[in-house]
Each structure stands twice: as C-alpha cells, then as structure tokens.
C-alpha cells in the first residue's frame, strides 16, 4: 500500500495519524484479465486505486463495446456519480490484464467519516 500513500502525498498533506486511520478501511485485491471490478447496472460502491497494471471502463450498445476511459497505475477507477449518489452505474470496469487494486468501499468511507466526526466532537 506504499504506492497509495505516495499517491495521496502527491495530492495533499496527509499525516501519519490519518494514514493509520485509513488503512483498516482498505483492502487489496488481485483481478484476473477480463475480470470485472464493477458491472454496468450495479451501484459502484467502491473506489479502486490501481496499484499495478490497468483496466478500462466501457458500455455496450447493440453488442458493440464503447470504451469510456482507461485507468493505469496510480489512477483511481470508479463511477463517481454512482459512488456518490447510489445510482446504478452506466458502464463496466474490467481488468485489461492481471491487476492489483486497493479498494475503499463506500461503507468503509462512511465509517471513517463517522469516526472522524465523533473524535472532533470529543475535542
């Protein structure tokens, strides 16, 4: 998960304490080539940090695949609209080769927010 920490540091100041709080909410998963990270028509309830290799998002119209994005190492793959609203995703996310992703689910994210809010109230 060191790559994810480097990625976060490239975006913002992030304390060791924050990293320690975040780590239990994360999971790491290996995906096989052509394995789906997310299916069209399902709610996208996860953020996928691409640790190694790459994946793509696409949708199908009349059996023809239309690529919408590629996500490479150090990218976050998700359907942000679905993740934020709870609406069904309009596209698939699939591994283009074997890949490793670090996953933060919406549920774990909300738990982190609640824990943070409780600790702020106790200050």
Image (tube, rainbow, N blue to C red):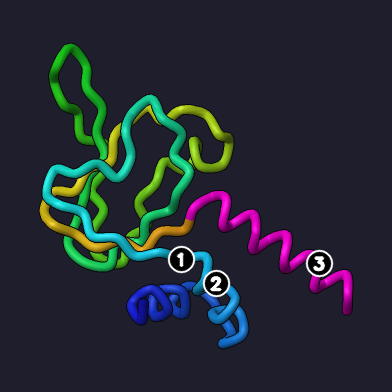
The Cα–Cα distance between marks 2 and 3, rounded to whole angstroms, is 15 Å
Q: Residue at x 21, y 66 (%)?
A: 52
Position of 25 relative to 59 (above/below)? below
Q: Position of residue 22 (x, y in %)?
A: 55, 72
Q: Main secondary structure of the magenta part?
A: helix
Q: Residue at x 26, y 40 (%)?
A: 57
Q: Position of residue 39 (x, y in %)?
A: 32, 33
Query: Is mark 1 in CB contact (under 8 Å) with mark 2?
Result: yes
* Circle 3: element type: helix
- In this view, the residue in front, 28 or 80, is 28
Residue placed under numbered mark 1 in the picture: 26
The Cα–Cα distance between marks 3 and 1, rounded to whole angstroms, is 20 Å
Checking the image for residue 118, the label placed there is 3
Q: Is 82 inside the magenta-drawn segment?
A: no
* Circle 2: element type: helix
Residue placed under numbered mark 2 in the picture: 22
Q: Earlier in the sequence, mark 2 or mark 3?
A: 2
Q: Position of residue 92 (x, y in %)?
A: 29, 34
Residue 13 visible, this orientation: no
Q: Residue at x 60, y 76 (%)?
A: 21
How many numbered markers are drawn? 3
The Cα–Cα distance between marks 1 and 2, rounded to whole angstroms, is 7 Å
Query: Is mark 3 in CB contact (under 8 Å) with mark 1?
Result: no
- Quarter of the picture containing the N terminus is bottom left
Q: Is 111 inside the magenta-drawn segment?
A: yes
Residue 51, located in which quarter of the rendered image?
Answer: bottom left
Tell me which segment is drawn in magenta. 105-123
Residue 56 visible, this orientation: yes
Q: Position of residue 60 (x, y in %)?
A: 22, 22
Residue 103, located in which quarter of the rendered image?
Answer: bottom left
């Amino acid at each position: 998960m060191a790559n994810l920490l480097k990625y976060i540091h490239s975006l913002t100041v992030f304390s060791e304490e924050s990293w320690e709080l975040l780590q239990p909410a994360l999971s790491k998963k290996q995906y096989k080539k052509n394995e789906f990270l997310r299916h069209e028509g399902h709610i996208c309830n996860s953020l996928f940090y691409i640790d190694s290799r790459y994946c793509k998002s696409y949708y199908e119209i009349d059996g023809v695949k239309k690529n919408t994005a590629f996500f490479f190492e150090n990218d976050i793959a998700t359907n942000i609209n679905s993740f934020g609203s709870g609406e069904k995703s309009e596209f698939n996310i699939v591994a283009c080769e074997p890949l490793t992703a670090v996953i933060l689910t919406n549920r774990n994210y909300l738990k982190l927010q609640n824990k943070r809010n409780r600790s702020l109230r106790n200050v």
